[in-house]
Amino acid sequence: MFGQADLISFAVVVAVLLGLFLAPLWLNRDELPAGPSQNKCIKHKTDRNNDPRLIARPDDTIKIIRLTNSGEFVDRCELTNVLYELNWDRPRPEGSFGVATKPCAKKLPKLAILYIHGWKHDAVPDDRDLQNFTRLVLDLRTIHAGQKYVVGIYVGWNASARLPGFLENISFWVKKKNADRIAQSAVVTKIVSAIGSVTKSEPDSLDQFVAIGHSFGARMLFSATAQSLVYETERAHPGFPGGEYKLVEGAADAVILLNPAFEASRYTAIDDITRKDEHFQVVQPPLMITVATDNDWATKLAFPVGQWLGSSRSQRELTTLGNYPPYSTHTLLPYVGEKAESETSVLTQDFYAAGLHLTRRQRDEERRVVHAVQSVPGCSNDKCGNRRSQWNLGTKI
């Protein structure tokens, strides 16, 4: 027979097991269901009032693409809406359907800015990341008025448990798993590739595409772009010692990772793109830029704890990329006083823009395809993330 102590112990074990099983379900309680069609937009049949083809272009609304925890589209038409915004002025074969356009709409180069938010955020209208991103896009539209159409694309996923204050931190492992499931689905690769195929569809196109990810969003964006970057770099190798690489291009003109929440060990293959014998072309732009602050507690403190509890032990496994000095190439510091903004041709050496100074840390002349920047001391994402984003974009546009 079981004694009272045995029954209490059994009840505690059952409660713990139920908690471990039910906690992820509860923390993911706000997940939206996947849309019925994943390969094409069918609203011209099911919901004509919201058919993206009927939206007059150009359209200045921020384009939101929502993803489920499994990496499916909540609404496939959200991606279609983005692509129509980018290709509405492209020539089409006779008989091919087009999209509505505004009277006297002018054909201009397009600057597509994609942002994937991180932990504790989502795509609801009052989300702080969405509001900050909207302000950034509006600022860029002011700068480029009459010269470029700036298209803002916000990728939303279930990264917030909507818990008060410090309690939100218990969602770390659940939301990290969500990010990895989305990355493994290849849906982010699909989104980035689809946008890149449009912006690079015409020879000598002046269109530009910058993809930005923050925290776990950077984790997803890195997973979506790193392998193709390695492939393109290896394909551009001259094939003999001392030669010059061909120009390396990616789906995006620049991939920017802000306080990326992934271990430095994932970056090793990218960091190895550092050659002493061969060299890159002088005109080779950096295609992947990592920017990390020195006081982001989530990546500096919470992430190592989470990794250790997940059985990681080596330094590169326990440390995020932005907090791993051997992979850092530059520092980004504020400067005071008058200083003319630099030409982008000196980006890999010393660069001044938006009140910030980029300076090389490692004298590695051939690291042109990727940069890992340790950023503004004491500058968290909340305090000056928009200024840092303006600086990042200023290096590309």
Image (cartoon, rainbow, N blue to C red):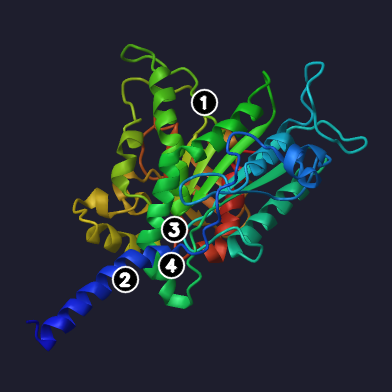
- Label 3 sits on a secondary structure element that is loop
The label nearer to you, 4 versus 1, is 4
The residue at the point 29 percent across, 61 percent down is: 306
Residue wearing tag 4: 26
Identify the amino acid type marked 3: Thr
The label nearer to you, 3 versus 2, is 2
Residue 57 visible in the snapshot: no
Separation of disc 1 and disc 3 at Cα? 27 Å
The label nearer to you, 4 versus 3, is 4
Query: First in sequence: mark 4 or mark 2?
Result: 2
Query: First in sequence: mark 3 or mark 2?
Result: 2
- Label 4 sits on a secondary structure element that is helix
12 vs 298: above or below: below
The residue at the point 73 percent across, 30 percent down is: 87
The label nearer to you, 1 versus 3, is 1
Residue wearing tag 1: 249
Query: First in sequence: mark 1 or mark 3?
Result: 1
Identify the amino acid type marked 1: Glu
Residue wearing tag 3: 293
Residue 29 visible in the snapshot: yes
Question: Camera-side residue: 47 or 141?
Answer: 47
Left or right relative to 391: residue 20: left
Callout 2: few (<14), some (14-19), or many (20+) C-alpha neighbours within 10 Å? few
Query: First in sequence: mark 2 or mark 1?
Result: 2
Q: Please identify the residue farthest to the top as the structure is shown.
A: 240
- Label 1 sits on a secondary structure element that is loop
Residue wearing tag 2: 19
Identify the amino acid type marked 2: Gly
Separation of disc 2 and disc 1 at Cα? 48 Å
